[in-house]
Amino acid sequence: MNNKLFIGLVVLSAGVLVGWYMMKGQQAPAVNTENVPEAPASAGSNLGAPGSFEGSGSGGVEKGGVQARSVVTLTNTGFAPSPVTVKVGTTVTFVNESTAIMWVASDPHPAHTILPEFDAKAGINRGGTYEYTFAKVGTWTYHNHLNPSAKGTVVVTE
Ligand SMILES: [Cu+2]
């Protein structure tokens, strides 16, 4: 009896979903256009860096893990890429693509004391972002304050 109503609802829902995805797609590049320095081609100081910081599939990853663009995505499997290596002064954008609320904060949980300013100080919904500009050289570990088993590392170099 209500087939028409049901089909109408399905079409409406699909439209809303498509619209949401398009908006989401537009947000991601827009936040990366400011304050992200281009990595110079002559990153010679990283040649002898110990360990391998292979990113997990992000298009912006260069050899050695130094990135011109710095975006870390939280999905239901955790933060990626991690670790990520950036130059001091780089703004890293954390994008919440998980199905839960994201609260990026520096270790240790729950005190957040190794880099107290590196703390979203609030939950960020799916599709939202948190940006932090790393002004101090060091290896900064962090976690999702609302799900502390999700961990990540940002290595900040000169
Ligand atoms: Cu915490």
Image: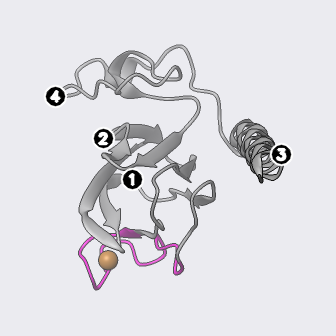
**Labels 3 & 1 near each other (Cβ < 8 A):** no
- Mark toward the viewer: 1 or 4: 4
Instruction: Give residue 75's position: percent from left, percent from top.
Output: 41, 47
Q: How many marks?
A: 4
Is residue 111 or residue 122 the one in the foreground?
122
Of the two numbered discs 1 and 2 on the same chain, state the one appearing first in sequence. 2
Given the current orientation, which residue lies at the most extreme left position? 51
Q: Which mark is residue 137?
A: 1
Q: Which mark is residue 4?
A: 3
Q: CA distance from mark 1 to mark 2?
A: 14 Å
Of the two numbered discs 1 and 4 on the same chain, state the one appearing first in sequence. 4
State yes or no: residue 106 in magenta. Answer: yes
Q: Residue at x 26, y 69 (%)?
A: 148
- Tag 4: amino acid: Gly
- Mark toward the viewer: 3 or 1: 3
Instruction: Give residue 98's position: percent from left, percent from top.
Output: 45, 53
Other-residue count near label 2 (Cα within 10 Å), few / some / many at <14 / 14–19 / ≥20: many
- Mark toward the viewer: 1 or 2: 2
Q: Residue at x 77, y 37 (%)?
A: 22
Helix, strand or loop: magenta stretch: loop
Instruction: Give residue 16's position: percent from left, percent from top.
Output: 78, 48
Q: Is residue 18 left or right of residue 88?
A: right
Depicted 37 relative to depicted 127: above or below: above
Is residue 28 or residue 76 the one in the foreground?
76
- The residue indicated by pointer 2 is 83
Q: Residue at x 58, y 66 (%)?
A: 125
Of the two numbered discs 3 and 4 on the same chain, state the one appearing first in sequence. 3
- Tag 1: amino acid: Val
